[in-house]
Image: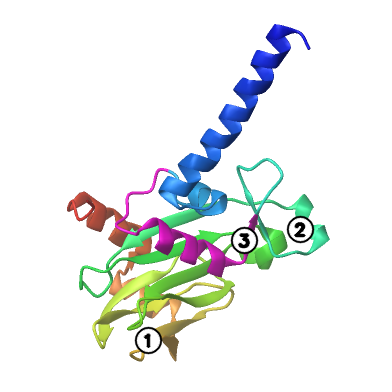
Amino acid sequence: MHASTFVKIVFIILMFFNVFAVQAQTGISEGARLLFSGIKTKLTSKEKNQVYLNTGFVLAADKKQFLFGDDPTAIQFPFTATVLVTDLNKDSTEEICLVFGNTYTSGNIGSNVLLFIKNKQGIYQSNFGFSGSMPLVLTTMSKGFPDLVIGGPGDDLPVWRWDGRQYIFYRKISRSALEKRKPSTIKQISNRYLHAGNQR
């Protein structure tokens, strides 16, 4: 074997082990790393992995986008996800909202919504998981959490209320009544949270 070839092989092997060493040190999966890339959050690597695993996402071939589930047809419809970090009940434990998808995953609305909230056992549980637009945050509260509206088709929109364990359907509100309340989007709430310097 030529000396230069041997050196190249050794270099490749060292790089290979270096990648795994970094993953072992950080403890974060490739999918979770992509999902939370550039996101300021208090979540540990373990918690990021937990959230990613519960999304049902898999990495697309380009490693820059996601697919939803194991459906072979989904390969043609990769998507990105918007990750919004906030603290809806102001208990210093972050909630993670994901708005993701496309017309393949979400129909005409073009996006799905997931909201991860840590339970009493310290596990991030998902809420929603259906197609809808960016959640709107109302000023009305239940057990420390604000009521949320997730837009969709029609004039009457569902209001979701926290019952102490999860968000459940509460009632409907018309678009005109909702506009009068001037709700904030969860993205605006997240921006305020981040701007206040709550990240470590």
Q: Is residue 123 magenta?
A: no
Q: Position of residue 102 (x, y in %)?
A: 65, 57
Of the two numbered discs 3 and 2 on the same chain, state the one appearing first in sequence: 3
Numbered circle sitting on residue 161: 1
Specify start and end residues of the magenta stretch as a single range: 38-58
Q: Secondary structure at mark 1?
A: strand
Identify the residue shown where x is 73% and y is 53%: 77
Helix, strand or loop at mark 3: strand
Decide: few, some or many residues near mark 1? Use Cα within 10 Å; few <14, some 14-19, many ≥20. many
- Label 1 and label 2: CA atoms lie apart by 32 Å
The residue carrying mark 3 is 57
Q: Residues within 10 Å of mark 3 (few under 14, many from 20)?
A: some
Residue 44 appears in which quarter of the rendering? bottom left
Q: Amino acid at mark 2?
A: Ala
Of the image marks 3 and 1, the number of the one nearer the N terminus: 3
Amino acid under disc 1: Arg
Q: Given the current orientation, which residue lies at the most extreme top position?
A: 3
Determine whether, in the image, residue 55 is placed left or right of residue 103. left
Amino acid type for the residue under numbered disc 3: Phe
Q: Nearer the viewer, mark 1 or mark 2?
A: 2
Residue 142 placement (x, y as % from top left): 28, 88
Residue 69 is left or right of residue 168, and the answer is right
Give the residue displayed 30% in from the left and 69% down from the top. 182
- Check the image and report above or below for 77 versus 17: below
Of residues 50 and 142, the one nearer the viewer is 50
Q: Position of residue 17 (x, y in %)?
A: 56, 36
* Residue occupied by mark 2: 74
Q: Using the numbered discs, state the Cα–Cα distance from disc 3 to disc 1 in whole angstroms.
A: 26 Å
